[in-house]
Amino acid sequence: MNVPFRPIVSALFRSRAGAILVAAQVAIALAVLVNAVYMVKQRVDLINRPTGIDVDNIFVVGATGFTKDLNYRAMLDEDLTWIRSLPGVVGVTATNSVPLSGGGSSDYVKMTPNAKGGRQTLVNYFHFNEQGAETLGLKIIAGRWFTKEEVQPPGNSLFAVYSGPIVVTKDYADRLFPNGDALGKTVYGSSSQPLTIIGIVDHMLGSWLTGVDHPSDIMYMAFQPSGPGTRYIVRTKPGLRDQLMRKVEAELGPRNVTRSVTYVRTLQLYKDRSYVTARNMSIYLSTVTVLLLGITSLGVFALATFNVSTRTKQVGTRRAVGARRRDIVAHFLVENWMITTTGVMIGCMLALAAGHVLSIEYELPRVDLYYIVGGVLVMWAVGLGAAWHPSRRAARISPALATRTI
């Protein structure tokens, strides 16, 4: 196959305006492609990270008392007893806040009772009963969960007044005690009340899935949440969630006329809401990237078509002196490959520069080099694919056209 590089370069310099514009378009497209795909991958990983919770089989019930005759403690006991009695329910607990929901409670835990001095950490905390671990599907890797006798009755359920056993996630235990000896240790609440770690949970994401440094720093307290409103977290056997949701929604309210059931929602709904910004950003970036690749393909296609239409006599002359069709195809493909490669080289530098700015301004990880390699291959494929049809069209030019006046 005869590919004359010097004539190709000479032809490009004679009509360099279009080539420069297409190369610039390729460079910008590569820079956007690499960083957009990398950012989408970061968000997909964020959305798909394990929660440590049996999300698919859990729903949440909101209940609020609204009369002066409400006996909140009796309401809790009756509701929990009835929901537990339903066939297919694995566990149920009342809670102060819903995991993965984007809203919850947090406070500081200190290593010493002294308010001044000593290390303290911010922790997301939950009030659960003796079925809390089973209800969420948590895996206890050390110690134990609360017993029924340890669960304190509803009242002033502020963290500042709670003093009793706690369970923590492994991530939080390791942050408190890097040597791995958290079990049995005592830490102190914001009011210097002692809190003894009796169990450690393998993993769980808390109330806030984005915008926090340590989403898996969780502490559980044996506490019934205060009223007059509460939330029940219910876990079912696989496949029974929707059926039991309808039953609870229809039958729980009439069992106690001093309160109302305000909502029944899946835990998956809360999770989806918390990730909606990340998901929308992924869709937006993916759409922009696809559109930009399409525009770049059109640019390469337009330039190749223009070159073919303006070099009809030149192509006919080459065909008349013995050039084969595949030689003509190779000529235009190599020409467009040179333009694309020039844009790719510039685009690599732009991609690295843009990645550096994003890592500084938005604290994102640096772009991995294999994303750039992948982007280069994609742009080469886009460039060659867009130039293929005009190149085939040029190869069909008859040698007789060389004798005509253009």
Image (cartoon, grey):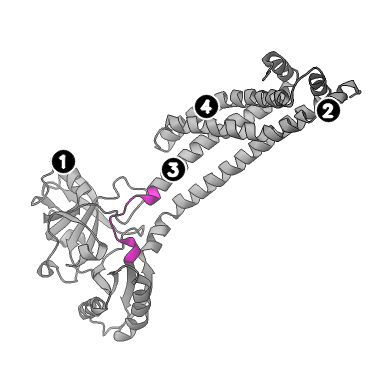
202 horizontally vs 337: left or right: left
Depth check: give the residue in front, 219 or 372. 372
Residue ranking furthest to the top: 6
Q: Is residue 30 magenta?
A: no
Which residues are the magenta region?
46-57
76 horizontally vs 285: left or right: left
| Relative image position of residue 131 (x, y in whole percent) | 19, 67
The amino acid at mark 4 is Cys
Cβ–Cβ below 8 Å for labels 2 and 3?
Answer: no
114 horizontally vs 220: left or right: left
As displayed, is residue 88 above or below residue 199? below
Mark 2 and mark 4: span between their CA atoms? 40 Å
Q: Is residue 157 visible?
A: no
| Relative image position of residue 10 (x, y in whole percent) | 72, 15
Q: Give the labeled residue for mark 2.
A: 398
The amino acid at mark 2 is Ser
Q: Give the labeled residue for mark 4.
A: 348
Work out whether mark 3 precedes mark 4 in sequence or the reverse, and give the earlier one. Answer: 3
The amino acid at mark 1 is Pro
Q: Quadrant of residue 335?
A: top right
The amino acid at mark 3 is Lys
Q: Residue at x 68, y 32 (%)?
A: 387
Mark 3 and mark 4: span between their CA atoms? 19 Å
As displayed, is residue 113 above or below residue 240? above
Q: Give the labeled residue for mark 1.
A: 178
| Relative image position of residue 279 (x, y in whole percent) | 46, 52
Mark 2 and mark 1: span between their CA atoms? 79 Å
